Each structure stands twice: as C-alpha cells, then as structure tokens.
C-alpha cells in the first residue's frame, strides 16, 4: 500500500457481510494482504496465493495457526489482535475490511517510509506456509 492509499482508507462505506470472497477482489495477483503481529509477538500473515486466501500465524520457524486455500475469509480472522504494518498491507484488502465494518479493529502502526521502500518489490512480506512447514499437523 502506498502512503496516499493509507491516508484514504478510513473514508469508506460499510458493508453488512463479514466474509470477503475471492470474487470481491479485483486484483487477483499473489501477494500479502495483511501483515502484522499478535500480542505474543507472533507474525500474522494473510496472503493471496493461487487464487485462494491463506492465514498463518508463526513464531520464528514454528507454525502456530494456519487456514489455507480458502474461497472466502471471515473479516475478523484477518486482523491480528495487536498491530499491522500499513506498508505491508494491501490497499484493496484493507479497504474491504473497512467496508465490512472492521476499520475500528485495525490497529495500524505509523507508516514507515524506509520499510516501504525496502519492501516495495516483494510480493510477500511474511513467510508463506511452504516456508514454515506444517509441524503442528
């Protein structure tokens, strides 16, 4: 997400459905949708891969939680209980969360220009499930 997009986010209308479906996305490219962390400092990564939603929570190389290859996601489950990095989140997806009424649940860190520049050409800003393995199966 760009800084200008970040600043426009909270000016959206509210939608009543809590689910975001693949068909709701205009941009179907593989990418990070939300990246942040939870109260236990675990990484929280929602990403889009091969036309499906994926949610993983991990710490170092240990998988804490995963829900992968989803056609739709519950908006509430896409938001970590601590913070998100705006420069590592997708504008379209965050805007959908706000339209679904979850804008107040988003605890967004200040925009970090240096971090944004460093990550601007990366599709994924966190690990994907194949990089962690499924140790907790």
Image: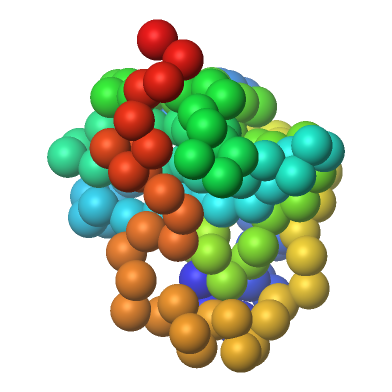
Q: Give the image quarter of residue 21.
A: top left
- Where residue 9 appears, as percent x and y from the top left, is 65, 63
Residue at point 45%, 61% (across, down): 125
Q: How many numbered dots are placed on residues in this image? A: 0
Residue at point 41%, 80% (across, down): 120
Q: Give the image quarter of residue 122.
A: bottom left
| Residue projecting furthest to the left | 50
Locate residue 7 relative to residue 22 in the image: left or right.
Answer: right
- Where residue 110 appears, as percent x and y from the top left, is 78, 73
- Can you say which quadrant of the picture contains the C terminus? top left
Locate residue 103 relative to residue 22 in the image: left or right.
Answer: right
Locate residue 104 relative to residue 57 in the image: left or right.
Answer: right
- Where residue 40 appears, as percent x and y from the top left, is 79, 37
Q: Is residue 122 above or below residue 107?
A: below
Q: Give the image quarter of residue 119.
A: bottom left
Locate residue 103 relative to residue 99 in the image: left or right.
Answer: right
| Residue projecting furthest to the top | 137
Residue 79 visible in the picture:
yes
Residue 53 visible in the picture:
no
Q: Which colour scheme is used?
A: rainbow
Residue at point 56%, 45% (across, down): 60
Residue at point 68%, 81% (across, down): 112
């Amino acid at each position: 997400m760009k800084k200008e997009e970040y600043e426009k986010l909270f000016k959206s209308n509210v939608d009543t459905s809590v689910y975001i479906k693949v068909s709701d996305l205009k941009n179907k490219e593989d990418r990070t949708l939300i990246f942040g962390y939870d109260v236990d400092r675990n990484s929280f990564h929602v990403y889009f891969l091969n036309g499906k939603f994926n949610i993983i929570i991990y710490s170092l190389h240990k998988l804490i939680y995963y829900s992968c290859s989803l056609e739709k996601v519950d908006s509430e489950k896409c938001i970590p209980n601590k913070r998100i990095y705006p420069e590592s989140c997708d504008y379209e997806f965050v805007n959908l969360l706000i339209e679904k009424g979850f804008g107040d649940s988003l605890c967004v860190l200040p925009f970090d220009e240096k971090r944004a520049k460093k990550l601007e050409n990366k599709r994924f800003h966190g690990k994907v499930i194949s990089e962690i393995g499924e140790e907790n199966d």
